[in-house]
Amino acid sequence: MLLRSLLVISVLLTLPGLRPVDAPARRLLRIKPMLGSRPLLLDGPAQRTSAGDELTVSVLRCYLGPLTLQFADGSTYQDPAPAHLLDAEDVASWLIELPGAPAKPLAAVSFRVGVDSATNVAGALGGPLDPALGMYWAWQSGYINAKLEGRSPSRPAAVRRAFSFHIGGYARPHATARTLRLPMPTPSAADTLTLLADVDRWVGAAPLAQTPDVLLPGPAAAVQAGRVAAMFHWPASAAKPSSYAPR
């Protein structure tokens, strides 16, 4: 009889809405690469930006720092991973697991777009920060926080219609990491949260014909760093705009 009662209780606790509010859940953050209102097509048919450029994206990579979940009750959860590398060639990289995150209504998510200065000067690291992944310049310049490459007829023939934006640099006044806070439009206890990364907010911020390639730290990289951070937003975030700041 006791065993049967325990089994019934166990089954009930697995039902939606009956899990204790502070119980660990398998919470996931799913990030969807977009270009405007459509999914980003890597090496696919040309897509049009809001600046009017036709382009094809061949490379999109971006570092996100540790995520902090801020719950409606005022408590927080800190992502144990030091960094996540989003890579358009690796679908799995856009799904971030948050181990042990409570199943409570979420009010906001905060994270760093890019790699902090301490990590930049720490030398060769492993995992998503492994220099072999192509996101590291050298010890003088550090990590590339975000990389976007592709082709567009708007670009000069002299560069074979190609564009390359490698955004990095950790030294002031041209540091490029940005700390981003995204309030939820409505607090959500969903196990999977969906965030958009709209490349149009980066590459569509200015006509490609007027935007030189960026391959080194400096003023141009610092300007584009703000556009990189602006890519990230909730599908219904218009009611509560995001905020970001240099970090």
Image (tube, grey):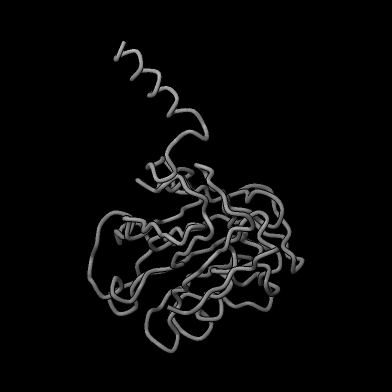
The part of the image, by quadrant, that contains residue 172 is: bottom left
122 to 39, vertically: above or below = below
Q: Name which residue lies at 63% across and 77% down.
A: 211
Q: Residue at x 57, y 73 (%)?
A: 243
Q: Determine the residue positioned at 50% across, 81% down.
A: 222
Quadrant of the image occupied by residue 117:
bottom left
Q: Would residue 82 be found to the left or right of residue 63 on screen?
A: left
The quarter of the rendered structure image containing the C terminus is bottom left
* Residue in the foreground of this view, choosing between 186 and 21: 21
In the picture as drawn, the residue positioned furthest to the top comes out as: 1
Q: In the image shown, does 19 or 119 lie closer to the viewer?
A: 19
Residue farthest to the front, as pictured: 1
Question: Is 164 situated above or below 24?
Answer: below
* Residue extending furthest toward the right: 52
Residue 108, horizontal then vertical, whole percent: 52, 60
Image quarter (top left, top right, bottom left or bottom right) of the N terminus: top left
| Residue 31 coordinates in the image, percent (x, y) | 53, 51
**Horizontal placement of 90 versus 125: left or right?**
right
Q: Residue 112: horizontal and vertical position, in percent?
A: 44, 67
Q: Is residue 38 left or right of residue 143?
A: right
For residue 222, above or below residue 36: below
Where does residue 154 sit, x and y in percent of width and height? Answer: 71, 68
Q: Along the horizontal axis of the image, is 52 left or right of 226?
A: right
Query: How many discs appear?
Result: 0
Q: Nearer the viewer, residue 86 or 215?
A: 86
Tell me where residue 107 sits by quadrant.
Answer: bottom right
**Which residue is at the front of the view, 140 or 191?**
191
Q: Residue at x 57, y 63 (%)?
A: 183
